Image: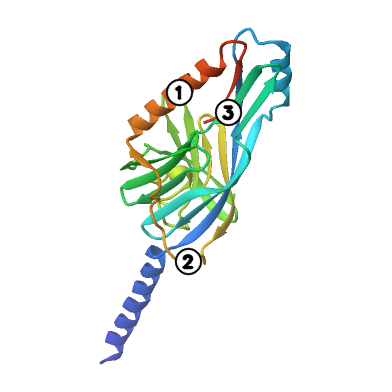
Amino acid sequence: MNKTTLQILTFAAVLFAFNFKIYAQTGRVVYTETVRLDIKLDEEIDPRLKEIKSLIPSERKSEKELIFDEDKSLFKTVDLQEAETERSDNGSVVIMRIESGGNENIIYIKGEEFVERKEFMGREFLIEGRVKKPEWKLTGESKEVLGYNCQKAEYLSEDRKDIAWFTTAIPVSFGPLGYGSLPGLILEMELNNSKTLLEATAVDLDFKPNQIEAPKKGKKVSQEEYEQIVIAKTEEMQQTYGVGGGKVIRIESR
């Protein structure tokens, strides 16, 4: 074997190792999620309910984590605040509920498919489908997040604006809440006109997940079926507690 051939083979081996390192990327990201709450009161609210409204926090924080390898990701809650409260005062029931699509959600993504576990009113559901890919537009803006240079991407629809900050230094197309489809890991997001903010607080690229598996516990339903269940149960709750002296406070988030 001559010297030139040896140099070519050595370069090819280094290039292969470099490419393998990129595409075999694994890691863990911890995010803080801040949800700004929009407190809505029923009509003809008595002064007691107005006092209650003033005591409700204007935002809710929770800790989330994303673990990933080269082709799969799992996003879940690590720690969260209490999401539901009930109060009874002189026979009048007040229901305060944070509507955020379920607080024990787990989102698993592999390739073009996703499995999402949602918890709603004590019931668990499994929703399967194809990953939706927002039509992101790059703005040309950049900033640093946890030492990573990130680029800004926006998605605009009729009534909302979503913003993602992603880094090509971590070349995986994943992010929080099942978002992705960008040429790098999403480290920060503003969703639904800034009502929800997700900020990475830690990135560990030495993290080696033992297994990344789809959730299996829950009743299998389509996205449309789940939405109908939520609508029906919400209306049922309002009818149960919103009449006969009962009042309802609805707290909406994203």
Residue 8's image quarter?
A: bottom left
Q: Nearer the viewer, mark 1 or mark 2?
A: 2
Q: Nearer the viewer, mark 2 or mark 3?
A: 3
Left or right of residue 212, residue 192 in this image: right
Q: Which numbered dot is residue 159?
A: 1
Colour scheme = rainbow
Which residue matches tag 3?
A: 97
**Mark 2 near mark 3, Cβ–Cβ under 8 Å?**
no
Within 10 Å of disc 3 (Cα), the crowding (few <14, some 14-19, many 20+) is some
Dot 3 or dot 1: first in sequence order is 3
Which residue matches tag 2?
A: 208
For the residue pair 183 and 53, the one nearer the viewer reads as: 53
Dot 1 or dot 2: first in sequence order is 1
Q: CA distance from mark 1 to mark 2?
A: 40 Å
Q: Residue 168: x and y, percent? A: 45, 54
Q: Residue 252: x and y, percent? A: 55, 26
Residue at the front extreme of this rendering: 91
Within 10 Å of disc 2 (Cα), the crowding (few <14, some 14-19, many 20+) is some
Dot 2 or dot 3: first in sequence order is 3
Within 10 Å of disc 1 (Cα), the crowding (few <14, some 14-19, many 20+) is few
Q: Nearer the viewer, mark 3 or mark 1?
A: 3
Note whether residue 185 is visible: no
Question: Which amino acid lies under the numbered mark 1 shown in the image of this protein?
Answer: Asp
Q: Is residue 57 above or below residue 46?
A: below
Question: Which amino acid lies under the numbered mark 2 shown in the image of this protein?
Answer: Lys
Residue at the top extreme of this rendering: 44
| Residue in the picture at 45% in, 62% down | 26
Question: Which amino acid lies under the numbered mark 3 shown in the image of this protein?
Answer: Arg
